[in-house]
Image (cartoon, rainbow, N blue to C red):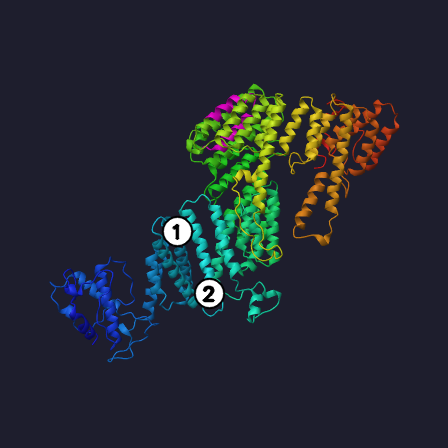
């Protein structure tokens, strides 16, 4: 029965004649379908007409990839002319084409025709009715093929497969996959449009516009299917389909940027974010106020529903959230302010809640900045608590807290608390967690705490000890200065994580006296042969710190010490650098730093410098040049220093404030004060241009509407491109100006020292360079010298009074802030106030100087016969300080009063003040009998000073 329509249609044009010699009346070209008479008697006839058209077209057109079909079984019930023809007249190719035609005629889309019945049986579908299981398996194959085509960026084939898949009734577990593929298909449309826009503009403009128009039509067709099928049932389906289009376009712009090797990738990421911003400004399906005006009745009312969107599509929310996280992670390093504002504006901007992953972007950024970074990470975590975001079961949050804590030494107790909090929340620490915890202990050189963490990893949590863990343990040995333990760990740390260390090696309180290593050079070379650069660097640091500990505070080294200890360091460095693949800049820089502490270091440092220039992986950087310029300044060899300065220009290395301070110090030591000041002024001029670019960088994000700051992200504008070191480091700093002031003081230019201090007060060196206690000490030393005039001494007295008043105003500003006016930055302001109080160390509104500055102040007053002012300053000091002054300060004041022969009354009064306020201090102890004359009239004690203020530690 089913072969009758075939016999009625096909005999007019037998398949055997349509190979290469078809008559001219029935010749079919590749660009037109054959004209076959149609009939409306039966739907079977139309079906086989389509099958025959595809069969003939498959002969003339290039073969496309075979489409998987759900029904591959041919169910013809009777003989056909083609089946009864002789094998010699029918080739294998025509047999395959006829089988494909018969098979292609069987699957009829349900949405179009339903179940088409015939006269024989009206209840069975075509092809015997495939089981649902077989159709589901065929749809799964189509989905797999669609995903592969999208991955290969084959747009035409992917679109063909998608048009077949969209007619199927998909299982519930494949709807999300189809939506994901639809978003990828839209992204591929945008990516193809960008590629054609970049390459086809040189062609015919009309043809180019037609191609873009065709791509837009097909993309709109996919978006309509998304709004009608996937997002059906909501009144905002078209707007959310536009969101899919915006996500696809945003991703395509970034993809095209990397494929085309664009030089402005950061700008492309900003433009990708702007695409989403433009969509959110045009379409807001969760805008409750707009819906109320249009007559849409919301299910909920009140302030709690303002951040809750009307739509709920979990797949679309995940797509949007994951892409926003990627955008934020790329923009956080140069647009930190934008990323912080996004965390507050995303709920109102896109109608979705901020997630933990979005906050992890900022945690990852701030975890690199040491103490300040740890405070910022804590503020981000508290911000998640305020927003009601559940983070206590996210291991990554604890990892970043530990990593930010690991930049500071002496925080093993805090690390233990964080790990215990994880265990209390049923979280098992992972390898990254323990890596950060071990690094906390390694910063302090606490190898015992590192071993304790290692044993817990192996015994309690069954974690593997990787190579990075080994490097952290070696870093702990380096900080401790224990070379033997470093070699032992490098050779005995097993993969299972057990740390076998010899007994009896304990760290003393301050001085470490390690045992002499019995490891030969051959054994060291064998141990270091398989080690990487990080391990070799830490082993070298361990031996260098061990040498420093043996040397102690002695600057003069004997020939025997240099022969024994220094030669070991040089031999180890030679063993490490035998393999060119295991060297880098840091290894050479560490060795240069060690050589700079030895007598006559420049010949050895110059040899290493030339060797670095000839290598590929160990080129000199800004740290290398800073160390060498510092050595040139100490050895007063500025001819070689000028050559290094010119080499930095040729290598295009940024001369930051540390390099510039070393160069200024060198010119000042040899007496070239004008050259030193010119170098400092040059840095100030460069800093002015850099600050201007930084201000543009910060102010480039301006809100579109100043009256409604809570709506919308900041508007994106073009920003200057700054190198990383220019973003982080300054060209000039307070240290550069200090070196300039020291140079003038050393060459008897106290007036110029005072003028530079006045310029700093007036802001002529920049708004951020303000004088501090150390700046004041340099000026007091210059004003208290023997060449200072009486006028300069009066100016120094007025300078000290101005400084104390400025510190008092700063303290009053911090303490006088009203609690009602505190904003979201009140936590940071209170921290700044606490730090200022600790630094200045005054009472509520009183400020004072450090103990060293008081000594210099009394020296200046006593040397220039200002004893009356000295008594006044002493009384003021006793009113504001909270800790006892040093014995050197009190002896200086007493001896200055004894020289003027005022009698014993002022001295007795001073002694009574000290004993009444600090009775626990031995002011008349035996330590006074051992005196040596110090600088001028300053007398220092040989024995250990029991007061807190000794050695400049007065306010610490």
Q: Position of residue 7 (x, y in %)?
A: 17, 73
Residue 603 lies within the magenta run: yes
User: Which residue is found at the position 50% from the left and 41% from the top?
Assistant: 499
Q: Position of residue 839 (x, y in %)?
A: 70, 39
Magenta: main secondary structure? helix
Left or right placement of residue 205 versus residue 740 in this view: left
Residue 704 occupies which quadrant of the picture?
A: bottom right
Residue 550 lies within the magenta run: no
Q: Residue 238: which disc? A: 2
* Gap in angstroms between the C-alphas marked 1 and 2: 27 Å
Q: Position of residue 576 (x, y in %)?
A: 46, 30
Residue 427 visible in the picture: no
Closer to the camera in the image, 420 or 902: 902
The magenta region covers 583-610
Of helix, strand and loop, which one carries label 1?
Answer: helix
Numbered marks: total: 2
Left or right placement of residue 391 versus residue 804 in this view: left
Q: Which residue is mark 1?
A: 197
């Amino acid at each position: 029965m089913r072969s009758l329509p075939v016999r009625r249609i096909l005999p007019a044009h037998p398949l055997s004649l349509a190979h290469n010699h078809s008559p001219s009346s029935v010749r079919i070209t590749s660009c037109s379908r054959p004209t076959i008479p149609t009939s409306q008697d039966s739907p079977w006839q139309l079906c086989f007409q389509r099958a025959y058209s595809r069969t003939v077209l498959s002969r003339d057109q290039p073969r496309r990839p075979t489409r998987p079909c759900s029904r591959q079984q041919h169910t013809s019930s009777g003989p056909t002319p083609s089946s009864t023809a002789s094998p010699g007249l029918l080739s294998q190719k025509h047999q395959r084409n006829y089988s494909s035609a018969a098979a292609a005629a069987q699957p009829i889309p349900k949405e179009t025709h339903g179940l088409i019945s015939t006269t024989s049986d009206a209840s069975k579908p075509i092809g015997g009715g495939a089981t649902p299981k077989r159709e589901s398996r065929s749809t799964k194959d189509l989905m797999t093929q669609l995903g592969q085509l999208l991955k290969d960026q084959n747009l035409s084939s992917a679109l063909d497969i998608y048009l077949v898949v969209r007619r199927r009734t998909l299982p519930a577990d494949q709807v999300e996959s189809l939506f994901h593929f639809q978003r990828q298909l839209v992204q591929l449309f945008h990516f193809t449009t960008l590629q054609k826009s970049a390459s086809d503009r040189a062609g015919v403009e009309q043809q180019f516009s037609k191609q873009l128009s065709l791509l837009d039509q097909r993309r709109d067709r996919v978006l309509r299917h998304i709004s009608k099928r996937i997002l059906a049932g909501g009144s905002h389906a078209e707007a959310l389909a536009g969101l899919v289009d915006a996500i696809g376009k945003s991703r395509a712009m970034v993809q095209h940027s990397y494929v085309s090797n664009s030089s402005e990738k950061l700008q492309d990421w900003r433009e990708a974010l702007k695409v989403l911003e433009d969509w959110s400004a045009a379409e807001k399906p969760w805008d409750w106020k707009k819906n109320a005006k249009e007559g849409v009745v919301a299910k909920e009312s009140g302030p709690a529903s303002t951040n809750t969107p009307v739509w709920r599509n979990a797949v679309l929310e995940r797509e949007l959230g994951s892409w926003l996280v990627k955008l934020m992670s790329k923009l956080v390093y140069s647009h930190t302010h934008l990323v912080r504002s996004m965390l507050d504006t995303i709920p109102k901007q896109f109608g979705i809640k901020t997630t933990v992953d979005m906050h992890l972007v900022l945690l990852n950024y701030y975890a690199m900045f040491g103490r300040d970074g740890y405070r910022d990470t804590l503020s981000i975590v508290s911000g998640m608590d305020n927003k009601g975001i559940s983070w206590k079961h996210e291991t990554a949050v604890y990892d970043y807290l530990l990593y930010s804590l690991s930049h500071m030494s002496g925080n093993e107790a805090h690390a233990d608390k964080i790990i215990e909090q994880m265990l209390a929340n049923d979280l098992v620490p992972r390898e990254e967690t323990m890596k950060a915890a071990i690094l906390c202990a390694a910063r302090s050189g606490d190898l015992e705490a590192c071993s304790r963490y290692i044993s817990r990893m192996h015994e309690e949590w069954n974690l593997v000890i990787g190579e990075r863990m080994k490097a952290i343990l070696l870093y702990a040995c380096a900080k401790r200065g224990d070379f033997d333990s470093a070699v032992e760990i490098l050779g005995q740390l097993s993969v299972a994580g057990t740390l076998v260390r010899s007994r009896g090696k304990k760290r003393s309180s301050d001085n470490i006296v390690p045992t002499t290593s019995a490891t030969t050079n051959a054994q060291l070379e064998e141990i270091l042969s398989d080690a990487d650069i990080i391990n070799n660097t830490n082993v070298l640091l361990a031996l260098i710190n061990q040498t420093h500990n043996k040397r102690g505070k002695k600057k003069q080294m004997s020939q025997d010490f240099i022969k024994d200890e220094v030669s070991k360091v040089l031999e180890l460095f030679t063993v490490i650098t035998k393999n060119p693949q295991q060297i880098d800049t840091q290894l050479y820089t560490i060795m240069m730093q060690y050589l700079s502490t030895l007598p006559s270091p420049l010949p050895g440092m110059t040899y290493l410098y030339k060797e670095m220039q000839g290598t590929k992986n160990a080129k000199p950087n800004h740290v290398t040049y800073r160390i060498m310029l510092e050595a040139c300044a100490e050895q007063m060899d500025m001819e070689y220093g000028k050559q290094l300065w010119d080499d930095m220009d040729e290598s295009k290395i940024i001369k930051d404030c540390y390099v510039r301070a070393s160069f200024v110090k060198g010119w000042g030591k040899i007496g070239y004060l004008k050259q030193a000041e010119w170098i400092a002024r040059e840095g100030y001029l460069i800093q002015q241009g850099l600050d201007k670019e930084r201000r543009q960088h910060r102010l480039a994000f301006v809100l579109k509407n100043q009256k409604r700051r809570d709506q919308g992200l900041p508007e994106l504008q073009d920003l200057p491109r700054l190198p990383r070191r220019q973003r982080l480091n300054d060209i000039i700093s307070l240290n550069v100006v200090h070196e300039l002031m020291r140079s003038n003081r050393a060459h008897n230019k106290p007036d110029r020292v005072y003028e530079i201090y006045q310029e700093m007060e007036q802001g002529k060196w920049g708004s951020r360079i303000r004088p501090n206690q150390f700046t004041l000490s340099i000026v007091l030393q210059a004003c208290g010298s023997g060449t200072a005039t009486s006028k300069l001494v009066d100016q120094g007295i007025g300078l000290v009074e101005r400084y104390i008043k400025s510190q008092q105003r700063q303290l009053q500003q911090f303490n006088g802030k009203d609690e009602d006016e505190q904003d979201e930055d009140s936590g940071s302001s209170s921290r700044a106030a606490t730090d200022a109080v600790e630094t200045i160390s005054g009472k509520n509104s009183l400020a004072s100087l450090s103990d060293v500055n008081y000594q210099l102040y009394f020296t200046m007053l006593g040397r220039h016969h200002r004893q009356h002012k000295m008594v006044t300053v002493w009384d003021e000091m006793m009113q504001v300080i909270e800790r006892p002054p040093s014995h050197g300060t009190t002896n200086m004041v007493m001896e200055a009063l004894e020289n003027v022969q005022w009698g014993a009354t002022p001295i007795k009064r001073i002694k009574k003040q000290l004993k009444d306020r600090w009775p626990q201090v031995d002011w008349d102890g035996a330590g006074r009998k051992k005196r040596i004359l110090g600088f001028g009239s300053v007398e220092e004690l040989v024995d250990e000073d029991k007061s807190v203020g000794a050695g400049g530690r007065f306010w610490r």
